[in-house]
Amino acid sequence: MNKRFLYSLLFCFIAAEISCFAAKATPAEQPDTNEYDTLALSIDGLGSPYVEGNYAIFTADKNARYVGISFDFENFRTIHAFKRRTIRDSEYKAIDSFYFYILELPKTVQQVKYRLVVDGLWTTDPLNESTVYNEETGITLSLLDASRYIPPVTEQPKKGLVHFVYQGSSGEQIRLGGSFTNWDSWIYEMVEVQPGIYQLDLPLPPGKYEYAFYRGMTTLVDKGNPDRCYTPDGKVASLLVVK
C-alpha cells in the first residue's frame, strides 16, 4: 500500500469527522451590529446569564476546549458555539479569558430553557442556579427569565394577513395608505387599541408593498419597520414584503 493511498484514506477520515461535527454544532450566528459589539465589550467576566434589552448573555469557564448552547425554542436541534474573549492588560498581554454567547431573543420568547455542551458532554449551566425538570424527557434544564416589554410592530402574523401598527400620541386620527390603495390615504383608518397604539389588520397577497401612515396631510414612515423606499412623488415611505 503506497503512501499516497494512505494519505488519501487519512484525509477522507478527517473530512468525515469534521462533517460529522459540523452537523451537530454550528458556529455562533451573531448579528454584526454596533449593538452586538457594545454588548460583547460590556461583558467583564464570568457570571449568571442575564437579559439586556432584546439579548440574553451567557458566559462559560475558560478551561473548556469547546462550549456550546442549545435552546428549547429550537427543540435542541442546533448547538451554537460560544466565542472566547481574552482580557489583556495595558501592554496588551493576555491575563485572562472566558467564553461568551449572545442570543438575540425571539420576539415570542419570554423564558429560555437551555443546556450547555462542554467538551462533548451535555450539562446544565453551572453559573445559573435556576433550573427546571422536564418530566417527559427526565432531563433537567437551565432556566433564564427573559420576560420583558415587547412593543407591537407591523408584522405578518399569518399568511395573507398584515398587522399594521403605528405608535404616537393618544387621540390622533391615523390613516393607512400605500401602493395597495394606489396611495389613497382615505380608505383605511387605524384603530386606537390602547393609548397611543393604533392598529389595522389588512389581507394582502404575497408581494412587495410600499406604505405610509397619515396624520392629517402629514406623511409618516413606520418607525417599527426599518425598511425604507421612495414613493412615486419622491417621499420616503416604508417597504413591506408579504410572503
Image (tube, grey):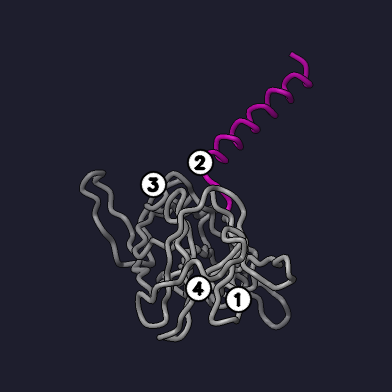
- Does 52 sit above or below residue 12? below
Quarter of the image holding residue 29?
A: bottom right
The x and y percentages for residue 192 are 38, 76
Question: Which-is-in-front pick, marks 1 and 2?
Answer: 1
- SS for dot 3: loop
Q: How far apart, in angstroms, are the residues tagged by discs 2 and 4?
A: 49 Å
The x and y percentages for residue 99 are 53, 64
Question: Does label 2 or label 4 sit earlier along the sequence?
Answer: 2
- SS for dot 4: strand
Residue assigned mark 1: 38
For mark 4, does the 10 Å Cα neighbourhood hold few (<14), some (14 to 19), or many (20 or more) residues? many
Q: Give amino acid for label 2.
A: Lys
| Residue at the far top in the pictured view | 1
- Does 238 sit above or below residue 139? below
Residue assigned mark 3: 75
- SS for dot 2: helix
